Amino acid sequence: MSPLQKSLLLIVVMALIWGAGLPVSKIGVQTLGAWPFRLACAFISVLFLYAVFWKPVNNLSTTLDPILYLKLFIIAIPNVFLVPVLNNIALERLSISDSTSLIYTMPCFTSFFVMILNRKLDSFSIASLTFCLIGVWLIIGSFQFSSSHLIILSSAVSWSIGSIIAQRLETNIDFRVKVFWQVTFGCVCAFLVSPLFLDWPTEIVKFRNDLSLPAAVSVLFMGIVGGAVVFYIWFYLIKLQSAEYASYATLFSPIISITLAITYFDENPSASTMIGFGLILISALTVNILRPAWTSRIHRGTA
């Protein structure tokens, strides 16, 4: 299998996982609460990755220098810690449809930040950002702007920044060890911060009592598939291609999420939400499909 074929296959798999991620997380968040659900998922992710990659982790971890650990920690903060936590908190109050539409502004922010870092104006990125902002305004314009809307948008920004950091921060070690320590650092951060938002003894007892079968399945799915597996694929795609290329996977995920929201959660997105979602999808297609196609055409014309 060629690198391109492998990348496309991974994109499809990751899109399916992320597409189911927000609806499945909604079940766990509604039953257990945002923080208990996030802590359980993070812990399961670390256990699963260690069970699979224990040998390279044990062999290399003792030889890693402090600077490398620091780099892995920096990469983990936006991608593995902030994004899942912010998503879970927002899902307590926002519908799946609104959350999905807003979180997938990530490719637009990624393209915008890349344009700024490269110090080069890009008409496609500017057009994409314009469509994106109009779409966001339509989604939140019919409601009173809430902290939950700000939280989910902050998650999208954090996701885009984390993707760029993951690509630009060199960490030349076994990829499996890299993913394990990033997920571990994300888990540690979640546990360290959690006492600020929940009462540990009370919440632990409540978690045990509230752990129904659907909640347990959602924890296992988001801990193993939606956590460990999808982060491995995400970072591998960034390594194999680029941060912008990895964002291709997000183009298919929101369609799956909104379909599940309508089918299984009886949500009925408003017209403004659907139009806003369409504009955000167009903005993502602009930078991830139209721009590469145009660039390729220009290069063929000048060859």
Image: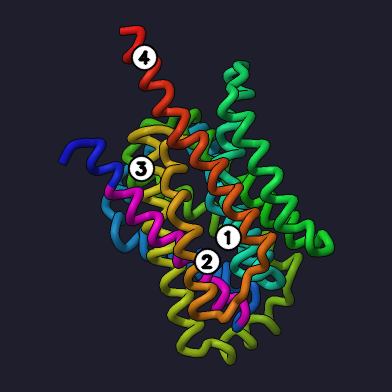
Query: Which residue was labeled with disc 1?
Result: 100
Residue 174, image x, y percentages: 32, 39
The residue segment tinted magenta is 9-30
Number of the label disc, if any, that sits on residue 236:
3
Q: CA gap, disc 3 to disc 4?
A: 28 Å
Tell me the residue at 48%/74% (across/down): 219
Q: On the image, which quarter does residue 292 sit in?
A: top left
Q: CA gap, disc 2 to disc 3?
A: 27 Å
Query: Which residue was labeled with disc 2?
Result: 258
Reply yes or no: does residue 160 show up in magenta.
no
Q: CA gap, disc 4 to disc 1?
A: 35 Å
Of residues 169 and 277, the one drawn nearer to the viewer in this rendering? 277
> Farthest residue toward the left?
1
Among the two numbered marks 2 and 1 on one chain, the one whose residue lies closer to the N terminus: 1
- Tell me, yes or no, if residue 244 can be seen here: yes
Tell me the residue at 59%/30% (across/down): 125
* Horizontal side of residue 79 vs 16, given as left or right: right
> Farthest residue toward the top?
302
- Amino acid at dot 2: Ile
Of residues 260 and 298, the one drawn nearer to the viewer in this rendering? 298
Q: Are marks 2 and 1 in contact (CB under 8 Å)?
A: yes
Label 4: which secondary element: helix
Query: Which residue was labeled with disc 4?
Result: 299
Q: CA gap, disc 2 to disc 1?
A: 7 Å
